[in-house]
Amino acid sequence: MEYAIETEKLTKKYGELTAVDGLDLRIKRGEIFGLLGPNGAGKTTLISMLCTMLEPTSGKARVNGFDVETQASEVRKSIGIVFQDPSLDDELTAWENLDIHGELYGMRGGAKQKAIENALQIVELYDKKDELVKHYSGGMKRRLEIARGLMHAPAVLFLDEPTIGLDPQTRRHIWDSVRKMNREKGVTVILTTHYIDEADVLCGRVGIVDHGKIVACDAPSKLKTKGESLEDVFLRLTGSDIREEKASNQTMRLRMRAWNR
């Protein structure tokens, strides 16, 4: 199976508002793929459909070969998600947070213990495994959330703004963790970010989303014309006006409730 993600005319409407508009996208297995777009462009809605948290209005999408509507449980077993909003239990240790996650995915005994150890080693937190998460820095918490998303061996990992609000040194550590898990585990990574330099450094390809459509999709180096940065390309294609976040905010309100259904 060549593609980790395939969509065909994927569409999501909220009444008169079309958040995702007939979107066609193919992401190969093993890619680190970046999704860029202004606020309200449709990124969050797209990711939420791919993660089975929202049902498409029309069109098709397959994740790891499974249909997001008719095989939602198989899709969920195939993916890991690191949400933009923190979702760790601060009163538990790092190990305990991952242990609970493993239980939710039906992991038991030695296999679960080995998975926790491997995930913590990838994000370089194994020596902090017995510390309460409330004593972790912001960057350590993000790395732990990445470890949690990894530990059940997903084929596809969705990272939603994984380095938002972090200092440059911590961001680099997150980047190193992402590269390491992609290289060592072969995980396909779908990254949404407003840090254009992050996508430029990490991603083999980026898709720029605007008004619910992919307006450009290629390697960052191929999207740039002479003398341009990736941010220049982004602004050239999407404009410089400040956008409203109505569709994005509506999706965010629905996504956690949908994930628990």
Image (spheres, rainbow, N blue to C red):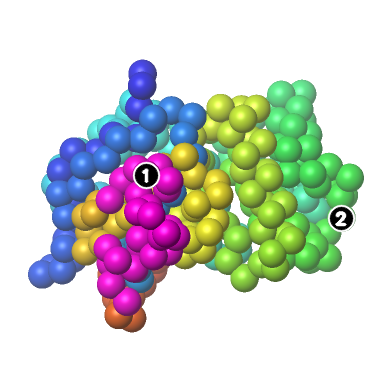
212 relative to 120, above or below: below
Q: Tell me where residue 232 appears, x and y as whole percent.
A: 39, 65
Q: Tell me where residue 56 appears, x and y as whole percent.
A: 21, 49
Left/right placement of residue 260 relative to residue 251 reads: right
247 relative to 186, above or below: below
Q: Residue at x 72, y 60 (%)?
A: 170
Left/right placement of residue 184 relative to residue 65 reads: right
Q: Is residue 234 magenta?
A: yes
Residue farthest top in this picture: 1
Q: Tell me where residue 216 appears, x and y as whole percent.
A: 28, 50
Residue to which mark 2 is pinned: 131
Q: Amino acid at mark 2?
A: Glu
Badge 2, how many Cα within 10 Å: few under 14, some, many 20+?
Answer: some
Q: Tell me where residue 159 appears, x and y as whole percent.
A: 51, 51
Residue to which mark 1 is pinned: 222
Please give the range of residues in magenta: 216-240
Q: Nearer the viewer, residue 10 or 77?
A: 10
Mark 2 or 1, closer to the camera: 1
User: Gap in Å between the C-alphas at discs 2 and 1?
Assistant: 45 Å
